[in-house]
């Protein structure tokens, strides 16, 4: 309580309380959190290492997978070290600038990841529906450009949010009931008018997510249409393997994101710890499972991973 009272008068800091209602279980909750984080880091760094080392994997599909791995590493690392510090050492204080930086990173990476998933769907569409033009349309150089464009799009989407929050008054209450600085959680402790902030976040989130999911759905509808024309079972199986991996990654990325955002905005009757756990699942579980899914479902990557693991 002494730390809380001190921080109330400090306008340069916030207090992150962890998971409200489950404070006594913080140490136990930290164990699966830390495990997911470490497994995610190992898996994604392994993908980056293997693709970087193996010349045969320097192809658009695997370069996109590397971009996805980078966003996964950035997303979980933006959150977990601080969250584990709260759970293990009661390091609840975070500066306002640190909080807004964390919020910017998360918004940028989230929008960038969504754009990468769209590009991956287009990559599968070109590989299956238009293979003769695949290498000319999706060259490695173009993938680098698309990665840069997705990063710029993420910045354009995310930067207004912390700028708006930095202009809001926070009065005496500077306690954020969360493990990290999620935008809506920070906004809720403000005593200013949140109408424009809420509207911008909701509209931009729905527009970006809606547009990206529409493009992904369009790509897969064309892929399914093309697969129905193919008589070769081997070609079916190969196409379905890579597509299944991508669909699983899409579901793992969008489902917790949508649930977390919708429950925070409209789930007033839901217990606060449910909001926080969903928000942490969004930044922990997809980064952990994405490299596993692609490692299992993509034969070339799986074989190269096995070869490199055996050499260690």
Image (spheres, grey):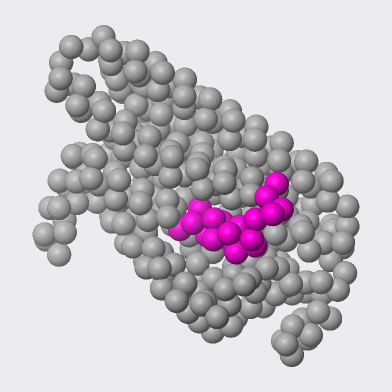
Location of residue 188 in the rendering, given as x and y in whole percent from the top left corner: 77, 59
Image quadrant containing the C terminus: bottom left
Q: Magenta stretch containing residue 256, yes or no?
A: no
Would you say 271 lies left or right of 143 here?
Answer: right
Q: Is residue 295 above or below residue 99?
A: above
Would you say 193 lies left or right of 145 here?
Answer: right
Residue at left offset 78%, top offset 63%: 189
* Dominant secondary-structure state across the stretch colored magenta: helix
* Residue 57 in view: no
Residue at left offset 55%, top offset 80%: 24
Location of residue 5 in the rendering, given as x and y in whole percent from the top left corner: 79, 85
Look at the image and give the residue range highlighted in magenta: 266-284
Location of residue 99 in the rendering, given as x and y in whole percent from the top left corner: 67, 65
Residue at left offset 18%, top offset 39%: 299
How many numbered circles are shown?
Answer: 0
Q: Magenta stretch containing residue 273, yes or no?
A: yes
Q: In this view, does 185 lie above or below 225?
A: below
Location of residue 232 in the rendering, given as x and y in whole percent from the top left corner: 15, 15
Snapshot quadrant of residue 201:
top right
Snapshot quadrant of residue 185:
bottom right
The outermost residue toward the bottom is 2
* Residue 97 in view: yes
Image quadrant containing the N terminus: bottom right
Residue at left offset 41%, top offset 64%: 37
């Amino acid at each position: 309580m002494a730390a809380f009272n001190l921080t109330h008068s400090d306008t340069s800091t916030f207090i992150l309380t962890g998971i409200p209602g489950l404070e006594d279980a913080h140490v136990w909750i930290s164990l699966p959190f830390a495990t997911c984080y470490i497994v995610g880091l190992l898996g994604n760094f392994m993908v980056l290492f293997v693709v970087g080392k193996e010349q045969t994997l320097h192809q658009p599909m695997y370069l996109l997978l590397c971009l996805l791995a980078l966003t996964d590493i950035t997303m979980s690392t933006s959150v977990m070290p601080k969250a584990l510090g709260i759970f293990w050492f009661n390091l609840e204080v975070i500066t306002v600038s640190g909080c807004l930086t964390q919020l910017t990173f998360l918004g940028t990476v989230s929008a960038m990841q969504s754009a990468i998933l769209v590009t991956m769907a287009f990559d599968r569409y070109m590989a299956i529906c238009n293979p003769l033009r695949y290498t000319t349309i999706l060259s490695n150089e173009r993938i680098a450009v698309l990665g840069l464009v997705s990063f710029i799009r993420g910045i354009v989407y995310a930067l207004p949010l912390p700028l708006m929050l930095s202009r809001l008054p926070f009065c005496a209450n500077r306690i954020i009931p969360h493990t990290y600085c999620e935008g809506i959680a920070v906004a809720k402790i403000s005593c200013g008018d949140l109408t424009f902030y809420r509207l911008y976040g909701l509209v931009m989130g729905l527009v970006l997510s809606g547009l990206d999911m529409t493009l992904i759905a369009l790509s897969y509808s064309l892929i399914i249409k093309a697969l129905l024309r193919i008589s070769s079972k081997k070609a079916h199986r190969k196409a379905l393997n890579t597509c299944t991996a991508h669909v699983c990654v899409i579901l793992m990325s969008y489902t917790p994101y949508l649930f977390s955002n919708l429950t925070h905005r409209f789930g007033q009757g839901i217990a606060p710890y449910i909001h926080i756990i969903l928000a942490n699942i969004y930044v922990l579980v997809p980064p952990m499972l994405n490299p596993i899914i692609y490692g299992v479902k993509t034969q070339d990557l799986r074989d190269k991973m096995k070869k490199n693991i055996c050499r260690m």
